Amino acid sequence: MQDLSPLIHTLQTQLRAEMSRAGVSYEDAAGPLHYANKSSIARLLVKDRMSFEDTIKLMVLCKTPVIALTKPFRFKIEVKASTMAQADALMDALRVSVFKDGTTERYRLPDGLSWEKVAEHTGFDSGKSARKSWFLLQTPVYLVVGLLRLLSKREHEVTEGKTSLRITQDI
């Protein structure tokens, strides 16, 4: 597995800059992101397990439609949403979008890809823990990036009504 910590830290730096630009304090962000207080937001923006949901919600809160990173990886997130509920709906759509086409099985990945392989690639202890984390409300950014890489997706887009989420990365 390629270490994605530098990507996470760069993303967090960009999110802090966007909060500053938009005039959104940690205290302002706590309520909409369902955190107890501003110190919870401060911890969120430094831990390696930063969630993709929180990333999207901070982008919506700061009215930042695009975050593009060029170092250490080329990575871009584009969000067209204006409410936290829309961000949640996009995240739900992202979770479902990786499943094998034509199947109704909730956990079925495309042929040739297993949750065990996802776990190995993203640093989880087991396929079960990777699968469980994919469906939790706090899905780590590195799990999203790692799974899309395994699917060989340079660009992945999901839509939910008039909202959309596009993730672009160099593989």
Image (tube, grey):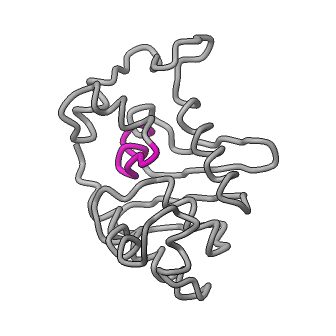
Residue farthest to the right, as pictured: 162
> Which residue is painted at 26% across and 24% down in the image?
116
> Residue 24's image quarter?
bottom right
72 displayed left or right of 65: left
Q: Which x, y percent locates residue 143?
A: 36, 43
Q: Is residue 69 above or below residue 111?
A: below
* Residue found at x 40% / y 39%: 149
On screen, 99 above or below 68? above
In the rendered image, residue 67, in percent from the top left (x then y), is placed at 55, 68
Q: How many marks?
A: 0
Task: Give yes or no for residue 144 being in the magenta stretch.
Answer: yes
Q: Residue at x 48, y 74 (%)?
A: 15
Left or right: where does residue 112 sit relative to residue 63?
A: left
Q: Position of residue 79 (x, y in %)?
A: 65, 58
- Seen as rendered, the residue at the extreme left is 125
Check the picture and name the quadrant holding the N terminus. top left
Magenta stretch secondary structure, dominant: helix
Image quarter of residue 109: top left
Residue 55, horizontal then vertical, whole percent: 50, 61
Q: Closer to the camera, 121 or 125? A: 125
Tell me which residue sits at (58%, 87%) in the image.
21
The magenta region covers 137-148
Indicate whether 108 appears above or below 48: above
Q: Was residue 167 drawn as part of the magenta stretch in this picture?
A: no
Nearest the camera: 158 or 83? 83
